[in-house]
Amino acid sequence: MNTRELTYVKAFNEGMHQIMAEDPDVFLIGEDVAGYGGVFHMFDGLLTAYGDKRVKDTPIAEQAIIGLGVGAAARGLRPVCDLMFMDFIGVAMDQIFNQAAKMKYMFGGAVSVPLTITTAGGAGMSAAAQHSQSLEAWLAHIPGLKVAMPASPYDAKGLIVGAIRDDNPVIVVLNKKMLGVKGPVPEELYAIPLGVANVVREGDDVTIVAIGRMVIEATKAAASLGELGISAEVIDPRTVQPLDIGTIVTSAKKTNRVLIVHEAVEFGGIGAEISSQVQESAFDYLDAPVTRLAAPFAPVPYAPILESAYVPDAARITAAARKLVERS
């Protein structure tokens, strides 16, 4: 494949262009996705390229956006419904968890719902408590939904293509603070299969399982740990539902120590589920308890200095991993 560097948002946009060119059943709806190209310009150029029959602005009505998407998917189309901010998912939760997630099951497999919901989550932009949340654990708890969280430009393109091609409802959570991050992205159309983790960096002393933007911070931390003589393996699950626990457990058996990092609040976060599964499958290999590093149980603060203290970073990951290695 021919590879060049693209930003995270441009890689996602290219994936949208290429999958819409490939499949005429794919269409896009959402608030300001057509004329403006989306609040973060994720959908730039799609209206010009594919016309207003396939790229539609909607009223500010999240229930209607997802309701339309569920119905269209059930009738054989492949809608992409944008909800702008992850926090707005709550407005359309009945359509998501009672309709999209359950329809295939309730009709005995006779109806598929190939619906993709795109949204932006995460803190770090002083967007305050109602526009900065990480709710992936909430969504991953619902049978029938898949949840993807791209942590690189390569994954942003590959996971949106994989999500749209999937015959089940998939929520693709982009990270707002990563939009300008650059990385290698093939020019050709490609899909990343859902449920396959990425070993970002190999190591022998401690496994760091990082979710979303925390992959970047964990990779920085791994470099710092290397200077201290600690070899850290960094794993990006890519999707939290389905979760590739096999790759995580294999790493845990090799390093004997596991640190899980996410920017969602610690209590009830996806880290608790990963911790439980690791200890069920690799307990005899662990030299120390599985450790979690996450946000405190509080809304995301607006003030930059407080928000910075709220979200884990490379320095805190380094300290937590070092403590985990030294205690065992």
Image (cartoon, rainbow, N blue to C red):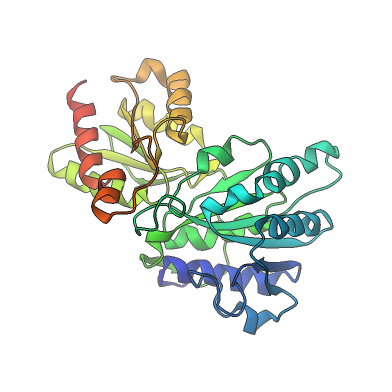
Residue drawn at (73%, 54%) of the image: 114
Q: Is residue 193 visible?
A: no
Q: Is residue 48 visible?
A: yes
The x, y position of residue 42, in whole percent, is 52, 70
Q: Decide: is 176 above or below 136.
A: below
Residue at the far left in the pictured view: 228
Residue lying farthest to the top in this orientation: 284
In which quadrant is the C terminus drawn?
A: top left
Res 34 → quadrant: bottom right
Q: Quadrant of residue 52?
A: bottom right
Between 138 and 43, the residue placed more toward the observer is: 138
Q: Give residue 37's position: percent from left, percent from top.
A: 55, 75
Rendered view: 168 above or below 62: above
Which residue is at a point 28% across and 33% down the rendered structure image? 206
Q: Nearer the viewer, residue 215 or 36?
A: 36
On the image, the x and y values in percent for residue 97 come to: 68, 42
Q: Is residue 21 left or right of residue 134?
A: right
Q: Residue sitting at 54 percent across and 72 percent down?
A: 14
Residue 43 falls left or right of residue 267: right
Q: How many marks?
A: 0
Please state which of residues 203 and 133 is positioned toward the viewer in this rendering: 133
Question: Residue 276: horizontal and vertical position, in percent?
Answer: 46, 23
User: Image point 51% across, 66% down: which residue?
Assistant: 12
Q: Is residue 201 above or below residue 115?
A: above
Closer-to-camera residue (69/205): 69
